[in-house]
Image: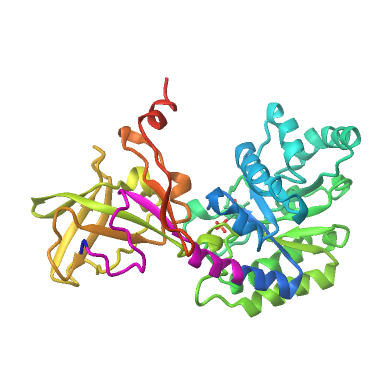
Amino acid sequence: MSKNKYLDMDITNLPTPAFIVDERLLKRNLETLKSVIDRTGCKILLAQKGFSMFYFYPLISEYLNGTTASSLFEARLGYEEMELKNPNKKLETHIFNPSYREDEFDEIMEITNHIVFNSFNQWKKFKSRVKEFEEKNGKKISCGLRLNPEFSEVETEIYNPAGRFSRFGVTLENFKENELEGLDGFHFHALCEQNSDALENVLRIFEEKFGKYLYNMKWLNFGGGHHITREDYDIEKLVKCINYIKEKYDVEVYLEPGEAVALNTGFLVSEVLDITKNEMDILLMDTSASCHMPDVIEMPYRPFIFGSGMPNDKKYTYRLGGPTCLAGDVIGDYSFDEPVKVGDKLIFTDMAHYSMVKTNTFNGINLPVIAVYTEKGGVEVIRKFGYEDFRNRLS
Ligand SMILES: *Cc1c(COP(=O)(O)O)cnc(C)c1O
C-alpha cells in the first residue's frame, strides 16, 4: 500500500499528515459553478467558512464573483487575498455575522461592500454608522437582512440553520415591514449538502412568507448548502429557480456555496505509526480525528479511505485511532484486502472543505502540512507548521 495506486501524482516524498488539494479537481468544480453564472447572470461567492485556502484565490477569482465571510478575519482574508489583489475584476466581499461587535464594525465597513444583518435590532444599531461611513468615504455598502423561512429539510440538527429556536434570521412573526428603509437585499440560508429540489421547496415557503417585500429589494442571497458540484446535482432545476426569482422580482441573485467549491478536490494523506491489538486490530495513525478532521466526531461522519471497505467487508479489519490521548479520537473501523503494515500510507478522500478550516492543535499535535498538486508544479508543500503554531495560541 505504500506504493500509491490511488492518486495520479507522486506523493512518495510528501511529509505526513498532509492535506493535498488537486488544482485540476478544483478547476472542474469552478467550471461547473461558472456555468451556472453564465446561464443565469447570478453571482456566486466563495463561503470561506468551508474553504479558506487562499493559495487558490487567484484561480477562484477567475470563475467566481468574490467571497463571503462570517467574521471580521474571514472578511479580511477575502478582501486582502481576493478582492484587493484583483482590482480590475469587480469582485465583492460580503459578510454575515449573527451579532456584530461594535469594536470591529469600522474595519468591517472598510473591507466589505455587502453587510447582512441578522435582526432588526442589529440593523437599527448599525444603520446610522453605515450611513455616516458612506458619506464620509464615498463608498456604497449594500445592506441586507437575513430572514428565516422556518423551513428546512436538513436532518442533522447541528447543521440546520432554520430549525426551531434557531438564532439565525428574522422569522415572519418578528418581521417589521416598516423598518426596511435603507435595506437593499434579503438573505436566507436553509440548506446543507442538498440538491436543488430542496432549494425549490425552501424558495416556495420563502416566497409565501416574504415574497411581497422582495419586489422592493435589489438582491436575494440564497445562502449556501447547494451541493452543485456533486454528480447527481440537478443544475437545470437550480438554473430555473434562479431565473424565476430574477425575472419575477427583478433582483440580483447570489449563491454562496462553501462545500460545493471544494467538494472532492482534496485528500488527507496519513501514515500508520503502529499496530496494536485489544480484542481487535488497531492502527495508530499520525492523523487525528479531533485535531485534523473534527467533523468526523462533530457531524459525525465516516470519511472514505482509498482501497477500504466497511468493517469485515474485506479480509482485514482495523480500528483507526489518532495520536492524541482522547479516548474518542477514533476515525472509524475499516477493512482492507491486504494486512496493513507500519509505514503504510492511507488516503482519506474529500478532505479539502470543512477540515483544513477546522484543524486545531489540541494535545500539542502538529497540524498537517498543506500541499497542492498543480499541472505546472506537480506536488508541492506550500505550508508547514511547527511548535510555534501550538505555542502562539497559548500564554
Ligand atoms: C455555512 C454557510 C455557507 C456555506 O455553506 P456550505 O454548506 O459550505 O455551502 C453559506 N452561507 C452561510 C450564511 C453559512 O452559514
In the shown orientation, is residue 176 left or right of residue 95? right
Image quadrant where one finds the C terminus: top left
Relative to 261, residue 243 above or below: below
In the image as oriented, which residue stretches furthest toward the top?
A: 395
Numbered-mark total: 0
> In terms of image quadrants, where is residue 100?
top right
> In terms of image quadrants, where is residue 36?
bottom right
Comparing 207 with 344, the one in front is 344
Is residue 214 at all visible to an observer of this figure?
A: yes
Residue 148, how many percent across, how many down?
67, 54
Residue at x 64% of width, y 46% of height: 78
Tell whether position 242 is magenta: no
Relative to 25, residue 132 above or below: above
Comparing 308 with 301, the one in front is 308
In the shown orientation, is residue 29 left or right of residue 130? left
In the shown orientation, is residue 125 left or right of residue 162? right
Residue 205, how many percent across, how many down?
69, 66
Image quadrant where one finds the N terminus: bottom left
Tell whether position 8 is magenta: yes
Comparing 274 with 80, the one in front is 80
Relative to 276, residue 227 above or below: below
Residue at x 13% of width, y 66% of height: 316
In the image as oriented, which residue stretches furthest toward the front?
A: 376
Tell me which segment is drawn in magenta: 3-31
Q: Quadrant of ligand 1?
A: bottom right
Please name the colour scheme applied to the rendered image.
rainbow
